[in-house]
Every structure is written in structure tokens, then in C-alpha cells.
Image (spheres, grey):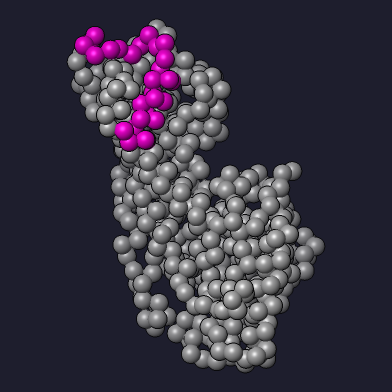
């Protein structure tokens, strides 16, 4: 089993995937251990001196003016977690929970949070031994961090709440006992250190951005098959065209298409059959490329956030200062995840329009709805309906969450980000987009068979062959959702991308 070392500064999205999905273990570096211990010593000293410091010796939010005695510190931290555990709705997937725990541990490992090393190690042990707190997906405003969902995570450290262990649901206490992990009694600053941050939205976003990168590649592959099915004009992808408008994503998409379609006998040149294609074919590099650029921007923001200290107050032990700031505010992520949802929705939007060109006899010379005996058979008629439904749903989901704000904590917290809603929406849009691409993939392969396969490109042939290993050409009507699901599973597995990249080199 692999291992990821965390120090608060060098975590990658690939590391998040390895821990969240592949079960990699987590370990602190020696340098991070030293920083955590130094930070904690300053907290202990300030508490002993009974200094008035937010979150150490005061209440929270609107109660920040209420001074808490040293004797009440433990009760304060426990009450914080219990009272803030207000999440509702469906439970977050286990992979997201593992991602949340990793990101919170990494933020604490930076050494600006004042947590005890033993408490941080308990959180890491939960990751390593597979104790996964049950965290409801709704209830975060995305400012003051993801308070409600992170509180559900911390409940299990205390032996409260519920968790999954070895695939079964237990009380927090039972899960910790079965895993052989001692529960924690929090002391000054620790509850706040554990829940004041953006790790829920960022974990959801990190997993989504990883999948989005693959979706962007898959969109190029699927579009390539549709190009062949419709005898599309590859002249529009000529490097000269894109060099004079050199957006990186656009240039990469054009390059991908040409490499995937290399040696195809089913594409055409300008003027060979027609002078130009409709926009959904001719402008694939521009449309896909814009989303690729958005994904790169968001990836950069996530890389910053997963290695940031996002709680409050922050402990600067070298200068012996405790500063109350606003790094918990999710606005940088909220805008990014709204952008991600929009970028992903556009892959589906244009994919569904390409599918429409495949099935509509007014737009191509293919048999109506991609079936020979039309009338008796409906063929792909309702496949396009389903794709249109998903695209319409994406348009609703793509409305930005970050433009909304509701004041909280008696107007002390008077602007909030809604970043966790933005992240969850982006993830849902990604799922819908993957399904639409599966429908186009299925339809493009069907159209190629109906037209007569005269020889596909070096990359598109790999994709076509993998589809045909799972799904036969449709001669008469059959239960279509099963075929769609098979294509979606192919996309989710990334096998199409992997095999194409082995043949023609990395796609961008």
C-alpha cells in the first residue's frame, strides 16, 4: 500500500486521489511535527496567562466578546462540536470523507492552528484504519469554513456521532473501539482548529477537478468519433488556425482531435464534400478549449487551497502572535467551483447537439434516429431526449451559488460564500455530463456502423473497439439504458483514455 507524507505545503491533487480512492496511508513529516508542537506550546502559554484571545479564551461568532475561563476550556470545545453538528441530507461518499480528513490533517500540519499533536495523529489514524465519519452533505454556508459538516467529522474523534468501519455502520465510539483508536477529549482551541476551514468544499472540488480533466479528454475522443460518423472536415483543426488565436485550451483541443483522427478514412477536407461544418463540429477546439482553460485555472486554485491554513485564529509562534483573520472564507473556492460547473456543463451542451446531428435526418444523411427499420423501431430517439433532459438540468445547476449570501451569527458573519453548494453542484453536473458523453459515444459508434466503417483514426479506432467489446450494433430496439450504462462505465474507468494515450501520447 502506498503512502502520502503531509507537511501542509506539498500535497497534490494526485495525493488526494490516492488517499481518497486508493486507500493510501498518511504520515506526518518530521518538520511538520515540530511546527505543530511549537504552535501548541504558544496556545498553552496564552491560556495559562488567561489572555483574551478569540477561540482560545472566548466564545465563537457573536459570542466572541464572552470570556471563557481556563477551567471551562474543555467544555467550550466539546460544546462547539456538539452544537455545530447540524448537517442534514444524504451522506457524503466515503471517498469524499477520506478527502476531507486528509485535507484537514494537511492544513493542521502546517503548524498555524495550535492543535495538539496527539489529536492530529488521532485524525490521521482514522484515515489509515478506515474509520469514516458519517457526514451529511448539506448545512454549510462556506464561510467560517465548513462548520456543520466538519463538526460531524470531529464527533467521531470524541466517540460521538456515527461512522462506517469495515463497510458497516456503527456509533462513533464503537467504530473507534473496533479500529483500536482512542477517542479524544478536546482542549483549548482544538475544536475550532478542526472545524474552521474549507476542507469539505475543497475535497469535493479536488475529486471533481480530477474527474473533470478526464472528462475534457473524453469529450475530445467522443467528438472525434462523431466527426467520423458525419464525415466532418478536419481542415478546421489545422494548427495555423489556432496559432493566430493562441488560447492554450483551444490549441490543445485541436491538437488532440488531429492526433486521435490521424489516418482516418472517414473524415474529409474543406470542399471535399462541403465547404464547412456546423459549429458543433467546426468549433470543437474553441468550445472544448474554453472549458479546458477553465479547468486549468480551477486546478491552480485548488492546489493553493489544499496547502493553506484556513482556520481562525492563526498561531504565529515565531513572533508569538495570535491573529484573528478570515482565511476560512470560501469565496476563492466558491467562484472557482461555480466556474467548474459552467465549464463542465458546456461539454454536455455541445455533446448533446452533436448527438442531435447524428439522430436527426434533416441534419445528416444517416438513417433517422440511427436505426434501419425506423417506425417499427425508435432507435436512438429517446436517447437524445434523455441527453436533452440532462443538459437542461445542468443549466439549472450551473446557476452560481456564490452570488448568494445570507447573514448568520446575528450579523457578525454577514457575508458567506456558499462554496460548498457550488462544489456539490459541480460534482452533480460532472455526473450528468459523463452520461451525456456516454450517449454520444454510443450514438457515434452506431452511426459509424450504419455509414460503413471505412477505417477510423489511430485513436478513435481504440475507442470504437472498446465500445464494441461491450455493446453490439443495434439492429432492432432493445432496452437502451443498459447500453448507455455500459458506455458510462467505460468512461468512468478511464480505460479509453489510457489505451489511446499509450498509442498516441498524452492528451491535453
Q: Does the magenta stretch include residue 260?
A: yes
The residue at the point 55 percent across, 92 percent down is 67
* Res. 52 in view: yes
Magenta-tinted stretch: 246-273
Q: In the visual, does 232 lie left or right of 170? A: left
x, y (%) of residue 260? 43, 20
The residue at the point 52 percent across, 36 percent down is 492
Looking at the image, is 142 positioned above or below residue 165? below
Q: Which of 476 and 28 is in front in this view?
A: 28
Quadrant of the snapshot with the N terminus: top right
Looking at the image, is 38 positioned above or below residue 54? above
x, y (%) of residue 493? 56, 33
Q: Which of 60 and 371 is in front in this view?
A: 60
Q: In the visual, does 8 lie left or right of 213? A: right
* Res. 371 in view: no
The residue at the point 71 percent across, 57 percent down is 29
x, y (%) of residue 365? 25, 14
Quarter-of-image position of residue 37: bottom right
Q: Is residue 416 magenta?
A: no
x, y (%) of residue 209? 47, 45
Q: Which of 174 and 56 is in front in this view?
A: 56
Q: Which residue lies furthest to the right in this view?
A: 180
Q: Residue furthest top?
A: 454
The residue at the point 42 percent across, 43 percent down is 296
Q: How many marks?
A: 0
Quadrant of the snapshot with the C terminus: top left
Amino acid at each position: 500500500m502506498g503512502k502520502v507524507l503531509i507537511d501542509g505545503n506539498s500535497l497534490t491533487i494526485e495525493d488526494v486521489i490516492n488517499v481518497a480512492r486508493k486507500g493510501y496511508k498518511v504520515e506526518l513529516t518530521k518538520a511538520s511535527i515540530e511546527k505543530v508542537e511549537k504552535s501548541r506550546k504558544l496556545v498553552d502559554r496564552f491560556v495559562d496567562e488567561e489572555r483574551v484571545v478569540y477561540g482560545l479564551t472566548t466564545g465563537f461568532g457573536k459570542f466572541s466578546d464572552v470570556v471563557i475561563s481556563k477551567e471551562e476550556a474543555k467544555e467550550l470545545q466539546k460544546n462547539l462540536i456538539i452544537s455545530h453538528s447540524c448537517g442534514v441530507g444524504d451522506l457524503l461518499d466515503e471517498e469524499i470523507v477520506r478527502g476531507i480528513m486528509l485535507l484537514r490533517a494537511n492544513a493542521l500540519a502546517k503548524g498555524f492552528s495550535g492543535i495538539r499533536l496527539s489529536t492530529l495523529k488521532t485524525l490521521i489514524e482514522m484515515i489509515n484504519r478506515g474509520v469514516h465519519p458519517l457526514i451529511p452533505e448539506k448545512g454549510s454556508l462556506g464561510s467560517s469554513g465548513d462548520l456543520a459538516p466538519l463538526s460531524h467529522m470531529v464527533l467521531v474523534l470524541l466517540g460521538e456521532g456515527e461512522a462506517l468501519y469495515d463497510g458497516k455502520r456503527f456509533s462513533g465510539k464503537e467504530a473507534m473501539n473496533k479500529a483500536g483508536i482512542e477517542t479524544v477529549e478536546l482542549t483549548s482551541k482544538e475544536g475550532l482548529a478542526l472545524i474552521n476551514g474549507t476542507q469539505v468544499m475543497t475535497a469535493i472540488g479536488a475529486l471533481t477537478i480530477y474527474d473533470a480533466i478526464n472528462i475534457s479528454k473524453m469529450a475530445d475522443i467522443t467528438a472525434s468519433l462523431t466527426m467520423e460518423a458525419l464525415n466532418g472536415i478536419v481542415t478546421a483543426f489545422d494548427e495555423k488556425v489556432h496559432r493566430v488565436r493562441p488560447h492554450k485550451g483551444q490549441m490543445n483541443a485541436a491538437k488532440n482531435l488531429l492526433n486521435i483522427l490521424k489516418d482516418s478514412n472517414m473524415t474529409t477536407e474543406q470542399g471535399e464534400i462541403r465547404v464547412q461544418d456546423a459549429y458543433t463540429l467546426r468549433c470543437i477546439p474553441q468550445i472544448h478549449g474554453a472549458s479546458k482553460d477553465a479547468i486549468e485555472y480551477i486546478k491552480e486554485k485548488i492546489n493553493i487551497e489544499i496547502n493553506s491554513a484556513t482556520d481562525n485564529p492563526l498561531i504565529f509562534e515565531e513572533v508569538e502572535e495570535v491573529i484573528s483573520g478570515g482565511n476560512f472564507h470560501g469565496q476563492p473556492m466558491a467562484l472557482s467551483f461555480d466556474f467548474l460547473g459552467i465549464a463542465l456543463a458546456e461539454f454536455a451542451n455541445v455533446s448533446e447537439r452533436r448527438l442531435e446531428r447524428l439522430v436527426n435526418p434533416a441534419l445528416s444523411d444517416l438513417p433517422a434516429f440511427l436505426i434501419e427499420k425506423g417506425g417499427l423501431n425508435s432507435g436512438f430517439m429517446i436517447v437524445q431526449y434523455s441527453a436533452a433532459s440532462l443538459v437542461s438540468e445542468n443549466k439549472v445547476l450551473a446557476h452560481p451559488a456564490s452570488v448568494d449570501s445570507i447573514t448568520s451569527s446575528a450579523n457578525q458573519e454577514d457575508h458567506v460564500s456558499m462554496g460548498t453548494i457550488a462544489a456539490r453542484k459541480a460534482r452533480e453536473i460532472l455526473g450528468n455530463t459523463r452520461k451525456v458523453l456516454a450517449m454520444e459515444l454510443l450514438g457515434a459508434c452506431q452511426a459509424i456502423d450504419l455509414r460503413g466503417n471505412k477505417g477510423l483514426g489511430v485513436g478513435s479506432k481504440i475507442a470504437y473497439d472498446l465500445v464494441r467489446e461491450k455493446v453490439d450494433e443495434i439492429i432492432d430496439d432493445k432496452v437502451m439504458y443498459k447500453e448507455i450504462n455500459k458506455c458510462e462505465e467505460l468512461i468512468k474507468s478511464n480505460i479509453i483514455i489510457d489505451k489511446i494515450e499509450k498509442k498516441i501520447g498524452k492528451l491535453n
